[in-house]
Amino acid sequence: MMLGMAGSGGALAAPRRVVLAVAIGSFSLAALMGIIALLGGGAFGETEVQVLLTTVTAGCAAIALLCNLAVLDDPWRWVGTVGGFAASLPTAVALVLIWHDWNGASDALFRTFFLGLAVALLFAQASLLLSAAGHRGGWILDGTLLVSSLLALIVIAQILAGDSNEIALRATGVLAILDVLGVVVTVGVARFGGRQPARPSGALTLPPDLRAALDDRASATGRRSADLLADAVRSYLGE
C-alpha cells in the first residue's frame, strides 16, 4: 500500500513543481516590474498604475494557486485541480481590464471577472480548509464548506441578476460572517483543539523498504512522513 502511494507521489510531484515554479516565477517577475515602476523615477502615471495592478493580480493568482496545490496529495485533489483552472479566468480578465480602457469595458466583461473571482475564492478556501483540517474537521468543516458554497451561490446570483435587494445583502453579510467564523473555528479546532492522542504501548516499525518509500514521498511533497502515514492508514480503514 505504501509503495503504491509513493508511486502516486512521483506522478504528482512533477506537475506540482511546475505549477509552483510558474506561480513563484510569475509573481517574482511582476514584483520586479512593480519595484522598477516605483523606483524608476519620472511621473507616476497610468503605466505605473497598470504595472502595480498587474503585480497585485499576479500575487493574488499565486496565492490562489498555492492554496489549491495544498490538496494535490489528498483525496480531495479534484478540488485543487478545479480551483487552479477557476483562478485562471478572473486573472486573465483582470489583466485585460488593467491594460485596456476599463471605462469602455462591457458589463459582460466585468460580470465575467466577478463570477470567476467568486468561484476561484470558493475553491481556494475549500482547498485551504481541507489541507488544514482534512479528516479532523468533522461537522465543523462540513458546515463551513456548506456556508461558503451558499455564500458563493448568492453572490453569483446577484452578479447574474445585475441587481440586489435588502434581503440578499443581509443574507450575504450573515453568510460571510458565518464563513469567516467557520474558517477560524475549523482551523483552530483541527490544529490546536483536538484531544491528545493516547500514548501507545509500543512503537510501530515499518520495514526498511516502506520507510524509504515513505521518506521519498515526504521529501517530494514537502509533508511530514507521519502525516502521510496517517492519511494512508485512514484511507485503508475507510475513514
Image: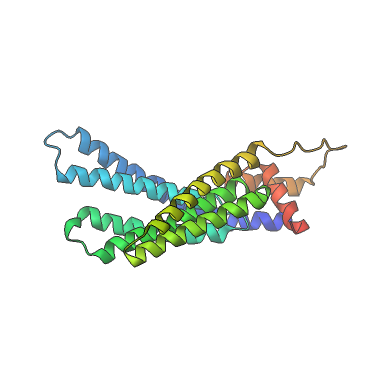
* 191 shown above or below 148: above
- Report whether 192 appears left or right of 1: left
Q: Position of residue 94 (x, y in %)?
A: 29, 55
Q: Residue furthest left?
A: 43
Looking at the image, can residue 29 be seen?
A: yes
Which one is in front, 164 or 21? 164
**Quadrant the C terminus occupies:** bottom right
> Foreground residue, 112 or 171?
171
Q: Residue furthest right?
A: 201
Q: Position of residue 44 (x, y in %)?
A: 15, 38
Q: Residue at x 21, y 35 (%)?
A: 38
Q: Position of residue 14 (x, y in %)?
A: 52, 54
Say which quarter of the image contains residue 75: bottom right
At x 17% / y 60%, what residue is drawn? 104
**x, y percentage for residue 19?**
45, 53
Task: Give the left or right position of residue 8, taking residue 232 as reference.
Answer: left
The residue sitting at the front extreme is 166
* Residue at 82% across, 35% down: 199
- Say which of 235 and 170 sits in front: 170
Nearest the eye: 193 or 124: 193
Q: Residue at x 45, y 51 (%)?
A: 65
